[in-house]
Image (cartoon, grey):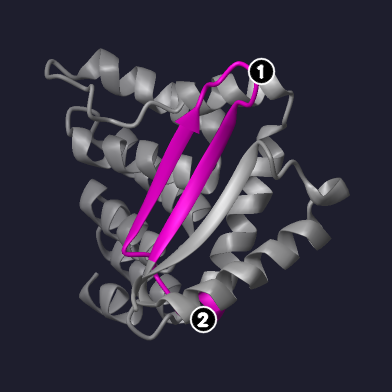
Amino acid sequence: MALGALSTIAWSDHEIDENHQRSINLSDIELSHRNYAVSLAAVLRFKQATEEAITASNMQPENLTALRLAQKYAVMAGEISIAVNLFNTLTERSNSDTENDFNAVHIAAILAKTKVSETELQQGQQIAFDVLRSHRKSPKSISTTVDDDPNEPSVLIEFEINTSFREAQAIHKEVGLRLCEELPDGGHPSVLMFSVVGIHA
């Protein structure tokens, strides 16, 4: 597990997978899968991270840590239907206040209202993460802002990275170009917005 975690520093997918699989083969327990999920998320592989966190949660349903991670990673992967189901499960299992857990229902409502497919969100997220991975930039934070204005409903996903405004702007432009080129008909930029911002002058 330790070697798998260290492999994230080098952004080595092969070493991350190999070391964590060895850990799982040696001890197929909740912690092994949860740590694998955390390492996958560290290098922006959120779809696989979601799958590993769900596996971990299923192994130890009374432990809500993996379930919370799975729900968070599903949103990051654009897997909104899965995230909604996970949130509902979390609400059922938790006796504490879950208000602070991100509720993907709001994003699902915007997609339904605008008739934009969940697949487009998944593709957009993957494009953004692919570009960030190519620059080895793991966001310091990822925020999602839902605007339910009846006339202009939208979802803004903002990636805050530890770099200069200028470099972030160049990466943002690269993401934008790929979105236009790779999403069907250029996507729906007025509904799904992706922004990369730097935190240094």
Location of residue 142 in the rendering, given as x and y in whole percent from the top left corner? 39, 53
Q: Which residue is depicted at the point 74% across and 66% down?
A: 177
- In the image, what residue type sits under mark 1? Lys
Residue 27 % position (x, y): 25, 59
The answer to if 155 sits in the magenta stretch is: yes
Residue found at x 36% / y 24%: 87
- Can residue 137 be seen in this snapshot? yes
| Residue wearing tag 2 | 135
Callout 2 amino acid: His
Q: Residues within 10 Å of mark 2 (few under 14, many from 20)?
A: few
Using the image, determine if residue 35 lies above or below residue 167.
Answer: above
Q: In the picture, residue 92 is in which quadrant? A: top left
Residue 149 pos. (x, y %) = 55, 21
Q: Which residues are magenta?
A: 133-160
* Residue 139 or residue 147, whichever sits in front: 147
In this rendering, the answer to whether 111 lies above or below 141 is above
Magenta stretch holds residue 193:
no
Q: Which residue is mark 1?
A: 113
Cα–Cα gap, marks 1 and 2: 35 Å
Quadrant of the image occupied by residue 25: bottom left
